Image: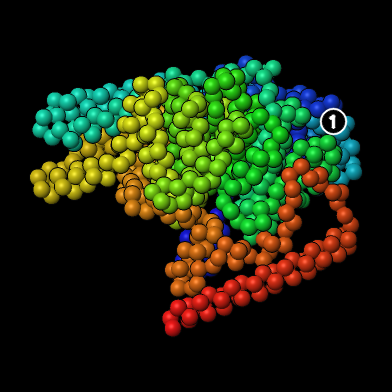
């Protein structure tokens, strides 16, 4: 959940994110293969069948047949043609192959007796994977309960108790979606893409014809259009590396955490619940001295894993608590030094791995020249509001088109923080330079993913694996979103200038594409001002051609989203492009002059605390005093330390009281030392004044 923007004289409201909710399995980690289980579901669809519907982006047949908790109204008609009685029911869980719903006793008797029925319902956006939101009317059969089981249930619970029925669709929802919503969509979108690209080419032809009248303006127009069209064309040719079932290198998942108590449990469970050999996978969570209850959540999650999955599984996860807040880079390096496997996977603490993410992301490392790989990041809270829908389209195009185009040349310029994998020896080799990175005399604190990518890309290959998927929580508040984008633009500017010193050595097409991509955003504010302000005022000409070109580029993004994903969010691609031109574009000039700032803006890091104190006219806290007391009460747990068995509550309280007393004594001692140091400084200043 994110906080909404502040309103005067009104309490802050909490906007709850809309997330898909999978029905809990009786096992905590159902996808982990072991001695007594395969990690597969016997009800899974065939992988070959799911592959026909590539726009739905499922990893395989089992991923496609996940069951989701829903709350739909369902109209039920008994009989094979739906000519029998009509009833109302309530859907409680749904998969592409069937549904669980509740009805009253009379409806249950008729449905179980007939067996075959017709159901009509609407899949609400956000309750199932994107591309499946639609109205459904299809035949189904009742597979449970039997007549005998129903009679027993009603005898025990009475006629007023709702009855839960299990239905199996005669046609799975993948086939239904393809048959009902794609008949005209694919030809229409294909034609739309052709028209948009043709219009862009014709407009650029005009730029060439009139080039001599305004060389700089038309040169920019040609470069910008060429850059975007090349990206889309190369992205269309991208194909992920196929899975080799026999290639399973050791992987250590590193999860840096700072004040993420809301999501950290889900992140840890998704990292542990991987369809991957258990002996070749470990998880290390590094808490960067959080000031909320993140550490308690980490401990409780590990204890839950130990209780429900056994000590052998729990031994594969460890956690470290930093003594003071040092930053994300320091946390990741601390984890990498403790990692025992050859590959390290970086996962943000508000991102959740698909159960098949690890198996997919390791495949490009079969090439010994590959130093790092980025997976695809989808938005988990897409349907929360218009802002998250806009970001969902942007994320998908940024990964499936932009990163895929770079992956075609083994030169991905940003291995994104939510899901990226590196060779451990390379991370440790560049660790000191990464931790101590400075740009124009200022320490680099954010942009850690782009910075590490530059270190790797300078001498190695970097790739993109579209089938390795994670889901991340994006801001649902414009204030938080703008601060995040400001930080990203600063890091993009800094790291793009660094990359420009060596990208010319890469494949020629990639080099040209990179320098075009560097030039276009930097010059864009001047071009927009020239076309939308200078031309109308000085020449009294409406900039119709410029605005048309802007809408065509926006239409290209939306049309690609519709073609590749068949999602109802596709129109928000147009909104994102317009919002970019009106708002986000103007962050770039600010980034030119504030690239040195180290504040995150979206969370209270020590730099943000210091900035807030400075604005409030208060003394800037030292790194030690900036860390709150609750963070110091946490035990610093070395990596590899086994989780102790859960102690009785009384014993735990006694232990905690003893730890708190000892830490409070230590805090008082440090405060005394700080006061003595301040007195010495004051005496030295007085002496210097005399």
User: For numbered disc 1, what is the local secondary structure?
Assistant: helix
- Residues 156 and 48: in front is 48
Residue designated by label 1? 147
The residue at the point 44 percent across, 42 percent down is: 390
Count of numbered circles on the image? 1
> Is residue 642 depicted above or below 420 in this figure?
below
Does residue 197 appear to the left or right of 279 in the view shown?
Answer: left
Q: In the picture, which quadrant includes the C terminus? A: bottom left
Residue name at image x 60 percent, y 67 percent:
625
Residue occupying the point 45% across, 68% down: 614
Q: Position of residue 440 (x, y in %)?
A: 38, 48
Q: Quadrant of residue 524?
A: top left
At x 71%, y 34%, the residue is 340
Residue 369 x/y as whole percent: 54, 21
Q: Residue 298 appears at what percent x and percent y? A: 72, 50
Return the x and y of residue 120 as percentages of the image width and height.
61, 33
Q: Is residue 42 visible?
A: yes
Looking at the image, what colour scheme do you see?
rainbow
Front residue (pair 247, 99): 247
Q: Residue furthest bottom?
A: 690
Q: Is residue 87 visible?
A: no
Q: Nearer the viewer, residue 685 or 447?
A: 685
Q: Say left or right for 111 vs 492.
A: right
Dot 1 alpha-carbon crowd within 10 angstroms: few under 14, some 14 to 19, many 20 or more: some
């Amino acid at each position: 959940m994110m906080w909404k923007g502040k309103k005067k004289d009104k309490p802050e409201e909490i906007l709850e994110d809309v997330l898909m909710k999978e029905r809990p399995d009786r096992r905590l980690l159902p996808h982990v293969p072991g001695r007594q289980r395969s990690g597969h579901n016997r009800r899974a669809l065939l992988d070959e069948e799911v592959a026909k519907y590539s726009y739905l982006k499922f990893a395989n047949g089992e991923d496609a047949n996940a069951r989701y908790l829903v709350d739909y109204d369902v109209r039920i008609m008994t009989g094979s043609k739906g000519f029998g009685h009509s009833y109302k029911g309530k859907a409680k869980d749904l998969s592409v192959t069937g549904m669980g719903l509740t009805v009253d006793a009379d409806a249950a008797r008729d449905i179980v007796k007939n067996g075959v029925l017709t159901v009509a319902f609407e899949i609400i956006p956000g309750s199932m994977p994107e591309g499946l939101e639609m109205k459904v009317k299809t035949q189904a059969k009742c597979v449970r309960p039997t007549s005998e089981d129903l009679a027993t249930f009603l005898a025990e619970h009475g006629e007023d108790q709702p009855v839960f029925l299990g239905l199996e669709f005669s046609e799975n929802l993948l086939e239904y979606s393809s048959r009902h919503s794609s008949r005209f969509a694919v030809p229409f979108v294909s034609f739309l893409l052709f028209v948009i690209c043709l219009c862009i080419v014709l407009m650029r032809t005009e730029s060439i014809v009139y080039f001599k009248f305004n060389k700089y303006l038309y040169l920019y127009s040609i470069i910008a259009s060429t850059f975007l069209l090349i990206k889309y064309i190369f992205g269309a040719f991208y194909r992920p590396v196929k899975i080799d079932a026999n290639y399973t290198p050791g992987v250590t998942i590193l999860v840096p955490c700072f004040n993420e108590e809301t999501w950290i449990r889900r992140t840890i469970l998704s990292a542990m619940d991987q369809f991957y050999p258990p002996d070749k996978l470990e998880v290390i969570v590094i808490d960067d001295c959080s000031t909320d209850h993140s550490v308690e959540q980490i401990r409780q999650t590990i204890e839950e894993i130990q209780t429900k999955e056994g000590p052998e599984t729990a031994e594969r996860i460890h956690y470290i608590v930093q003594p003071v807040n040092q930053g994300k880079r320091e946390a990741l390096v601390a984890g990498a030094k403790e990692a025992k496997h050859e590959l390290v996977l970086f996962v943000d603490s508000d991102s959740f791995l698909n159960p098949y993410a690890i198996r997919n992301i390791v495949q490009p490392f079969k090439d010994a020249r590959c130093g790092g790989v980025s997976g695809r990041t989808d938005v988990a809270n897409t349907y929360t509001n218009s802002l998250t829908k806009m970001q969902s389209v942007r994320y998908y195009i940024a990964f499936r088109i932009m990163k895929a185009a770079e992956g075609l040349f083994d030169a991905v310029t940003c291995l994104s923080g939510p899901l990226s994998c590196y060779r451990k020896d390379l991370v440790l080799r560049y660790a000191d330079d990464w931790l101590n990175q400075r740009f124009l005399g200022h320490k680099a604190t954010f942009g850690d993913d782009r910075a590490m990518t530059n270190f790797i890309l300078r001498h190695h290959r970097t790739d993109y694996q579209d089938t390795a998927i994670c889901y991340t929580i994006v801001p649902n508040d414009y204030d938080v979103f703008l601060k995040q984008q400001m930080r990203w633009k600063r890091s993009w500017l800094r790291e793009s200038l660094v990359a420009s010193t060596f990208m010319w050595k890469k494949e020629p097409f990639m080099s040209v594409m990179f320098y075009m991509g560097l030039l276009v955003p930097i010059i864009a504010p001047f071009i927009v001002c020239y076309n939308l302000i200078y031309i109308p005022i000085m020449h009294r000409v409406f900039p119709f051609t410029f605005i048309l070109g802007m809408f065509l580029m926006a239409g290209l993004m939306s049309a690609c989203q519709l073609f590749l994903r068949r999602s109802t969010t596709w129109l928000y691609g147009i909104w994102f492009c317009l919002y970019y031109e009106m708002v986000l574009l103007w962050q770039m000039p600010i980034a030119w002059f504030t690239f040195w700032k180290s504040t995150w803006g979206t969370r209270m890091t020590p730099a943000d605390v210091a900035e807030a104190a400075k604005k409030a006219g208060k003394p800037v806290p030292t790194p030690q005093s900036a860390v709150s007391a609750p963070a110091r009460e946490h035990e610093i747990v070395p990596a590899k330390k086994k989780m102790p068995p859960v102690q009785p509550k009384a014993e735990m309280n006694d232990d905690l009281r003893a730890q708190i007393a000892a830490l409070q004594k230590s805090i008082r001692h440090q405060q005394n030392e700080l006061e003595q140091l301040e007195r010495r400084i004051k005496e030295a200043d007085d002496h210097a004044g005399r």
